[in-house]
Amino acid sequence: MKTHAKQLFWNALLLSAASLLMRTVGVSFQVFVSNRAGAEAMGLFSLLSGIYGFALTLATSGIHLGVTHSVVEAVGSDRADRISPIMRRATLYALGFGALSSVLLFSFSEPIGIYLLKDARTVSSLRLLGVTLPIIALSSAWGGYFTAVRRPYKSAAVQVTEQALKIGATMYLLTLLVPGNAESICCALVVGGALAEILSFFAEALLYRYDRKKHFPRNVSLDEQGIFKKLLGITLPIALTTYIRSGLLSLQHILIPEGLRNSGSTHTAALIAYGSIQSMALPVILYPAALISSFSGLLVPELAEANVQKSQRHISYMIGRVWSLSMIFSIGVAGVLICFSGEIGNALYPGTEAGNYIRILAPLIPIMYVDTATDAMMKGLGEQVFSMKINIADALVSVVLVWLLIPKYGIDGYVATIYFSECFNTVLSIAHLLTISHAPVRLLKWVYKPLLCIVGATSIVRLFLLLLPFHVANATLSIFLHCALTAAVYLCLLLLTGAIEREELSWLRGFFSKKSSP
């Protein structure tokens, strides 16, 4: 096995471990905040996400992917002398768009809060959020650099530090403010995140500066205008499409609480229902996706390099492997959350409807996770514009469904919208990737066998726990026991049914062996 493949594996393992650690801490923190702040404050905080998401899209404007592609191409063509000019231009680009986004959000926060979100309590939080946009844009550019040069662990270290700082600052502020009103709690959440982003920004700046000077010394003899035009050729098409999609998503976030109110709910009840899904159920649903997201991010430079070298066989192999692992993993996660949603909901959010929403949304997990991996692979193959077209169509359909269904069916209409949106996006993305890659499809191995195995695993564990002569009183320990036993039985059944084949076991063992195999 090539050393390069091992490097990818160990980078993926490191990033996945860091991401899973951050998600674990993040979900635990989300549980703490939700239980302490209340569903209304979390609903108000979720209401900000649509507007802030658009501002963040404007601030970054495709710079992460632009830097990744540009630096990978420079390294792959033995033009490492181009990397410093690329990064200088990328830094100016990020600063310009970050500052523009910050000024616009700060200037228009009052009309946005009062007339669009229809809640004046959001104005102060929107102004605070605008402060962080320039530094997030710069961090996005540097993150693209670390991904491209295959040193993502440095960016991961910064993210772990940021998460720790955010939790510490927010918990301290909440301790001072709770009990308090929803507006002050929302501001505390924003300020805690902003302080962490500012401090982690300086840490990432130092790491980036040291890494670039060490590996790619400054070179001023190149045509930086030409380099900048090439960078813009990647970032601007991505930026334009992401603006449209993010604008549609922002509209969707605005329409959801409005639709819930039109269905007969009060403003407070609408925020509570919205917060129960967005801030309670979805973080649990997306928690295991940390593993898929980390690995998928590393696929972008790998597939980009294979695409430059026109290695179609390697591309097809990687796509098939990623889909296989993604389906096996995501089907297992979905089975666990469906089977044990009641226990998980009661342990994390007692006295709420979170467990019910976890069970309702859990069947979407395979679709969500495979879509994440598919989008990353399409970006690696240079199909990011087509991917964004799918995302725009998805967002447009979602806005129409939210407008039509939620006023009539309430929260059930929102759940139906999520289902249709995720299926629509994933089907189109997979169909396009199959068309351009001719990757093999093995439904029996990837779908049917894992489904059979997870049904068997959860049934066996349920029966085993019922027959135990004692009951595990601690809720957290009980959840861990349920999940660990199910994972062990699921793995055994996967091996017995051939869902995981000998060749794949040999492939995995190769990453841990000291000798390289062909």
Image: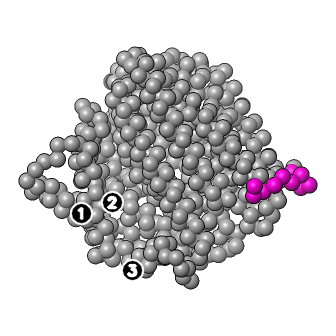
Question: How packed is label 2: few (under 14 Cα within 10 Å), some, or many (20 or more)?
Answer: many
222 falls in the magenta region: yes
Q: Secondary structure at mark 1?
A: helix
Side of 190 where 341 appears, left or right: left
* Residue 13 x %, y %: 49, 60
Residue 502 disc label: 3
Residue 457 disc label: 1
Give the camera-side residue of 448 and 321: 321
The residue positioned farthest toward the left in the image shown: 469
Residue 332 disc label: 2
Colour setting:
one colour
Q: Are marks 1 and 2 in contact (CB under 8 Å)?
A: yes
**Could you give the CA–CA distance between mark 1 and mark 2, rounded to whole angstroms?**
9 Å
* Residue 332 x %, y %: 33, 60
Quadrant in which residue 351 is drawn: top left
* Residue 355 x %, y %: 27, 41
Residue 29 disc label: none
The residue positioned farthest toward the bottom in the image shown: 518
At horizontal 64% and vertical 49% (from top left) the residue drawn is 143
